[in-house]
C-alpha cells in the first residue's frame, strides 16, 4: 500500500492506518513537549530508537525572576514550536509526510504552555491524516528508561523526582502504573531550587547545588530527614527547606563561607530520604529493578547512593543519561508509541483538553489520553 493510499485510509480510519503502519513500517512518532519551560520535539522509532531530540530551553529568560513565569513561557513556546519541530524532523532525516503518529504532552503542567504544544500536535496530526495521542508528562518521564539499553522489564519500581513532582510508582506495563506515594508538599527538585534561591545561587538550583556539594562536607551540618511514615511512600521536603532557611538566618554573617557544606548537607538529606523510600518500595513489592527518572535523577549522589544500596540487595538500577532525565520530547514519543498501540481507534479525540494537575488513577480506557498514572 502506497503512502498516499495509507493517508487516504488514515483520513477515514486513523486506527487502521496505525495498524497498517505498525505491521509494515518502522513507526516514527513525533513527540512534542511544552509543559513548562522547555519547547521540545523528537522523532522516536518503535518507542526505543531516538532519531532526533531537540530541546529549546527558556531557562535564561526566566532566570532573572527566580522561577518560571507562566505567561512568558507560553509566549516563548509559541515562538519556538515551529522551528523546534522543523529541526527535529530535519535532524531525523525525514519530512513531515514520513511521520506515522504524534504524541504530545497533555498534562500536568502550566495550562498556557501545554496548550501551545497540544494544539500544534493535534493540528499537525489532523492535517497529515495520522493518529495522535495525548501523553501524561509523568508517564513520559517513566518511559525515558526505555530509550537506552539495557532497559527494565515489568514490573519495576520507578522513583520520579522532578521540579514539579516526587512520586514512587509500581510500573506494571507501558500503560499501567500504580502510584505508591508522592510528596505532600514540595517536590525534591523544587526544594533544590528553593534552597539555591535562599543561598543566592540562581535558578534552577539542582545542578549548582550538586556541583557545590561535591566539595562540601555532608556531615558538618546535620539537616533533618523527614520520613513521615517509614512504611509508607509519601515524601515531605518543606521541613528540610525551612531548616536550611533557619540555618542561613542564624548564620547570616558567615553562611556564605559554608555554602559547600550547606549544599552537601542539604543534598544528602534529600538523597537519604529518596533512597530509603525507593529501596523500601522495591522490598515491599518484591521488585528486583528500580528506575530513577525526572530532573533530580541526574543527581550523581542519588544515583550512586541508590546503586550502592541496590547492589547489596541484588537489585538492578536503571537511570537515563542526564539529558533524558530533564524534560524532553523523546520520552513523550516513547510513551506515545505504546499508548497509541494500546488505544488504537480510541486515540486522538480532537475535543480533548490539557490538564494542569497530576492524575493518579490507573489507565482509563474511555479517556482520550493514554495516561498510565
Ligand atoms: O524533570 P524536570 O526537567 O522538570 C520537571 O518536570 O519539573 O526537572 C527539573 C528539576 C529542577 O528542579 C532542577 O533543579 C532539578 O530537576 N535538577 C537537579 C539536578 N539537575 C536538575 N536536582 C538535583 N541534582 C541535579 N543534578
Ligand atoms: Zn518533567
Image: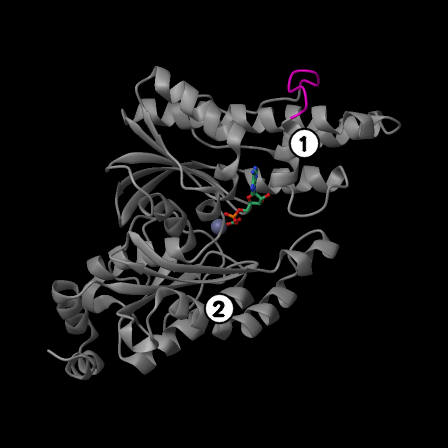
Cβ of mark 1 under 8 A from ligand 1: no
Closer to the camera, 232 or 119?
Answer: 119
Closer to the camera, 264 or 359?
Answer: 264
Judge the density around disc 2: few (<14), some (14-19), many (≥20) Cα neighbours within 10 Å. Answer: many
Residue drawn at point x = 17 percent, y = 73 percent: 17
Whether residue 91 sits left or right of residue 16 in the image: it is: right
Q: CA distance from mark 1 to mark 2?
A: 33 Å
Residue drawn at point x = 38 percent, y = 69 percent: 89
Q: On the image, numbered disc 1 is attached to which residue?
A: 212
State whether residue 204 appears in this view.
Answer: yes
Q: On the image, numbered disc 2 is attached to which residue?
A: 84
Q: Earlier in the sequence, mark 1 or mark 2?
A: 2
Place of residue 164 in the rendered image (x, y in percent of width and height, measured from the top left):
54, 47
Q: Quadrant of the N terminus?
A: bottom left
Q: Magenta part of the protein: which range?
A: 215-222
Secondary structure that dominates the magenta span: loop
Closer to the camera, 267 or 188?
Answer: 267
Dot 2: what SS? helix
Q: 165 above or below 44?
A: above
Residue drawn at point x = 19 percent, y = 83 percent: 4
Place of residue 212 in the rendered image (x, y in percent of width and height, measured from the top left):
67, 31
Residue 114 on the magenta span: no
Q: 32 above or below 236?
A: below
Closer to the camera, 362 or 262?
Answer: 262
Amino acid at each position: 500500500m502506497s503512502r498516499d493510499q495509507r493517508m487516504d485510509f488514515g483520513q477515514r480510519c486513523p486506527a487502521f492506518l496505525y495498524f497498517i503502519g505498525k505491521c509494515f513500517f518502522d513507526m516514527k512518532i513525533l513527540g512534542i513537549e511544552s509543559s513548562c519551560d522547555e519547547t521540545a520535539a523528537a522523532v522516536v522509532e518503535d518507542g526505543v530508537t531516538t532519531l532526533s531530540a531537540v530541546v529549546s530551553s527558556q531557562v535564561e529568560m526566566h532566570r532573572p525572576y527566580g522561577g518560571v513565569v507562566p505567561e512568558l513561557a507560553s509566549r516563548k513556546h509559541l515562538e519556538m514550536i515551529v522551528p523546534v519541530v522543523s529541526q527535529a524532523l530535519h535532524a531525523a532525516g525525514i519530512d513531515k509526510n514520513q511521520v506515522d503518529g504524534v504524541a504530545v504532552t497533555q498534562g500536568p503542567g502550566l495550562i498556557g504552555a501545554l496548550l501551545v504544544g497540544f494544539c500544534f500536535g493535534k493540528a499537525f496530526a489532523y492535517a497529515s491524516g495520522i493518529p495522535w495521542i495525548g501523553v501524561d508528562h509523568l508517564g513520559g518521564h517513566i518511559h525515558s528508561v526505555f530509550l537506552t539499553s539495557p532497559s527494565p522489564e515489568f514490573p519495576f519500581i520507578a522513583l520520579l523526582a522532578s521540579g514539579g513532582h516526587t512520586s514512587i510508582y509500581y510500573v506494571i506495563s507501558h500503560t499501567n502504573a500504580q502510584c505508591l506515594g508522592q510528596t505532600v508538599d514540595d517536590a525534591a527538585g523544587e526544594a533544590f531550587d528553593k534552597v539555591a534561591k535562599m543561598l543566592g545561587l540562581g535558578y534552577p538550583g539542582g545542578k549548582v547545588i550538586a556541583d557545590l556539594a561535591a566539595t562540601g562536607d555532608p556531615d558538618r551540618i546535620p539537616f533533618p530527614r523527614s520520613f513521615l511514615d517509614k512504611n509508607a511512600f509519601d515524601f515531605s521536603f518543606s521541613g528540610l527547606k525551612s531548616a536550611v532557611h533557619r540555618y542561613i538566618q542564624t548564620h547570616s554573617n558567615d553562611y556564605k563561607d559554608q555554602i559547600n557544606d550547606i549544599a552537601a548537607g542539604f543534598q544528602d538529606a534529600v538523597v537519604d530520604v529518596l533512597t530509603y523510600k525507593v529501596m523500601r518500595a522495591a522490598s515491599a513489592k518484591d521488585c528486583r529493578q528500580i528506575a530513577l527518572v525526572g530532573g533530580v535523577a541526574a543527581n550523581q549522589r542519588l544515583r550512586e547512593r541508590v546503586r550502592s544500596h541496590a547492589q547489596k540487595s541484588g537489585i538492578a538500577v536503571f537511570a537515563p543519561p542526564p539529558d533524558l532525565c530533564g524534560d524532553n520530547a523523546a520520552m513523550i514519543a516513547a510513551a506515545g508509541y505504546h499508548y497509541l498501540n494500546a488505544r488504537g481507534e480510541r486515540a486522538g479525540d480532537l475535543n480533548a483538553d490539557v490538564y494542569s494537575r497530576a492524575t493518579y488513577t490507573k489507565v482509563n480506557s474511555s479517556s482520550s489520553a493514554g495516561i498510565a498514572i
